[in-house]
Amino acid sequence: MQKEITLIDRGRGLQLSTSRITVHDLVPYLQAGCSHDEIIRWIPSLTPKEIAVIERYYRQHQDELDEYECRVQAYRAEQIQLQQLRFPEREGSRDERLAGLRQLLQQRRRESNGEGTHS
Amino acid sequence: VKGLIADANIQGQVEYLVQRMQAEAWADFWQALDLVLRRFEDVGLSASATDLEVWNVCRAEHLILITDSRNLDTEDSLEATIRRDNTPESLPVFTIADMNEFRTNSSYVERVVEALYGYLLRIDQVRGTGRLYLP
């Protein structure tokens, strides 16, 4: 007999009883109107039945979940701003940035080969 | 770093990311860093593993976790685990900043690849930072 799929709380928001996937994980897909096939393309471990359980819950609690998603986005934007102060994005053209990464790669290879970083 | 591992909610995106990381323009980076993509089943994690179990396996196996946590700082047990167990030597956890862009915008994916390689090439400088967003 197949186990019933339910939503349970393990301290990270409601998630499927059968997997780590949470209701919040699927909210952006459901907001974007993604089909079940498209969701499975990105999260291949999900079954149509599991998606249906989350979708049903989403439709019943849409306002609350959409509002939570807005807060998630705002929190994320704030964290990204803080990160950029600490680790600024590389500047310059794509070619210049790629050249910088290649220098780092060469340096790493020299270090792996036991060559020092200075003469 | 022994490789990358995708959280359960981001498997397809990370498979695609790795394809782009292995594509011609970036293949020598992938090879030089000696990366592999591991899956939950490769490292004994079940589909319903807890955040703590995932964190512990990533730490023990020296794997970089790529995730898409959609929980707020105060409620996400992965955040709580990072805060509690993170050490100066811990590998960071990477989160793709905008999954909608990732799904629909190829140049955004390229920025994610570039940012991830940028961090992987100086991994010792970003150990202990906890979560880092890409790009």
Image (cartoon, coloured by chain):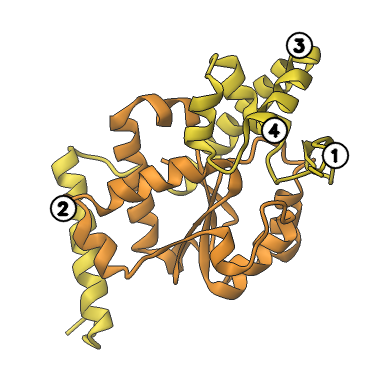
- Residues marked 1 and 4 touching at CB (< 8 Å): no
> Where, by quadrant of the figure, is residue B81 drawn?
bottom right
Type of amino acid under label 3: Asp
Q: Which chain is orange?
A: B
**Disc nearer the start of the sequence (2/1):** 1
Give the label, 1 or 3, closer to the camera.
Answer: 1
Q: Image point 58% across, 59% down: which residue? A: B40
Dot 4 crowding, Cα within 10 Å, few <14, some 14–19, many 20+ = some
Observer-nearest of B132 and A19: A19
Q: Quadrant of the N terminus of chain A?
A: top right
Q: Secondary structure at mark 4?
A: helix
Identify the residue under disc 4. A50
| Of callouts 1 and 3, the N-terminal one | 1
**Residue A74 placement (x, y as % from top left):** 62, 25
Which residue has dot 3 on it? A63
Give the number of the disc on residue A8: 1
- Residue A78 visible at all: yes
Chain painted in yellow in the figure: A
